[in-house]
Amino acid sequence: MARIRTIKPEFFTSEDIVSLSPLARLLYIALWCESDREARMVWKPRTFKMRYLPADDCQIEALCQELIESDLVILYGNGYAYVPSFKSHQHINHRESESQLPEPDAKTTRAPRVGTRQPRDLDAQGGREGKGRIDNASGFALFWSAYPKKVAKTAAVKAFDTARVNSEVLDIILKDIESRKGSDDWQKEKGKFIPYPARYLKEKRWEDEVGSSGNSEPKPWDGAR
């Protein structure tokens, strides 16, 4: 049975909504449809992209991260999520199927990851997904979205895969990038001295002290060697 969700006029002027990017707002509305009657869903960013934003050129992982950081979506368990304010704004048809997903406070096998595993379970639309695996694509998308010099993407993808960046290291990398964006080296001459992303990854520049990258102009390098 199709799910019917409602949207109130005040949604568009809500403080937590206007702070989102336009596509993140649209995705948030779409996730109401993804949610079952208990506001629960299987967390599958790639599926959300194909299902709700198929014609949009966007980084779905970055949009999902906006919703998570705004506490509009909460991750839990082994690849699940729920919308905390869902029941405050939605009137659920009593004929809608009962949730088949675990409760947010139920014990699960591991801590949640952001879009890295496609769980083998009933999804919010009633289908089944095959066994998933750790996916570097979502982690790289967050890195690429944050990195200010977007050149030689193919080489950067290869370097990211080779580095085998886990969620803990990725968090360190993203924080390092944010801190370096305000440094003299990275701001000088319109970012002339920002290393290519593949070099940053291959040389593990996040382990350097901020300001220690030197002032010599980096040679054009695609990370191939």
Image (cartoon, grey):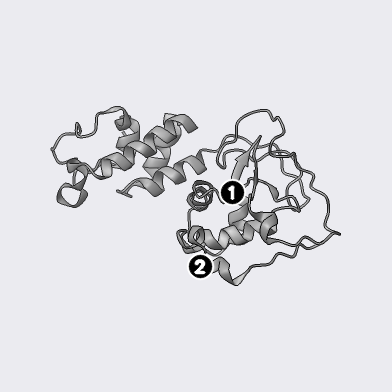
Residue 127 in the figure: left or right of residue 18: right
| Residue 86 figure quarter | bottom right
Q: The disc labelled 1 sits on which kind of residue?
A: Val
Cβ atoms under marks 2 and 1 closer than 8 Å: no
Residue drawn at 45 percent across, 42 percent down: 140
- The label shown at residue 13 is 2
Residue drawn at 53 percent across, 68 percent down: 12
Depth check: 163 or 37 in front?
37
Q: Residue 31: horizontal and vertical position, in percent? A: 63, 56
Q: How far is mark 2 from mark 1, CA to CA? A: 19 Å
| Residue 92 figure quarter | bottom right
Q: Residue 211: horizontal and vertical position, in percent? A: 19, 34
Secondary structure of the residue carrying tag 2 is: helix
Depth check: 191 or 17 in front?
17
The first of marks 2 and 1 along the sequence is 2
Residue drawn at 61 percent across, 54 percent down: 48
> Is 2 placed above or below 126 here?
below
Q: Residue 212: horizontal and vertical position, in percent? A: 19, 31
Q: Residue furthest left?
A: 216
In the rendered image, which residue does mark 1 sit on? Answer: 73
Residue 155 in the figure: left or right of residue 214: right
Within 10 angstroms of label 2, few (less than 14), some, or many (20 or more) residues?
few
> Is 19 placed above or below 144 here?
below
Secondary structure of the residue carrying tag 1 is: loop
> Is 53 placed above or below 123 here?
below
Q: Quadrant of the N terminus?
A: bottom right
Q: How many marks?
A: 2
Residue 96 in the figure: left or right of residue 149: right
Residue drawn at 26 percent across, 28 percent down: 208
Given this view, does label 2 or label 1 mark the residue nearer the observer? Answer: 2
Q: Visible in this render: residue 223? A: no
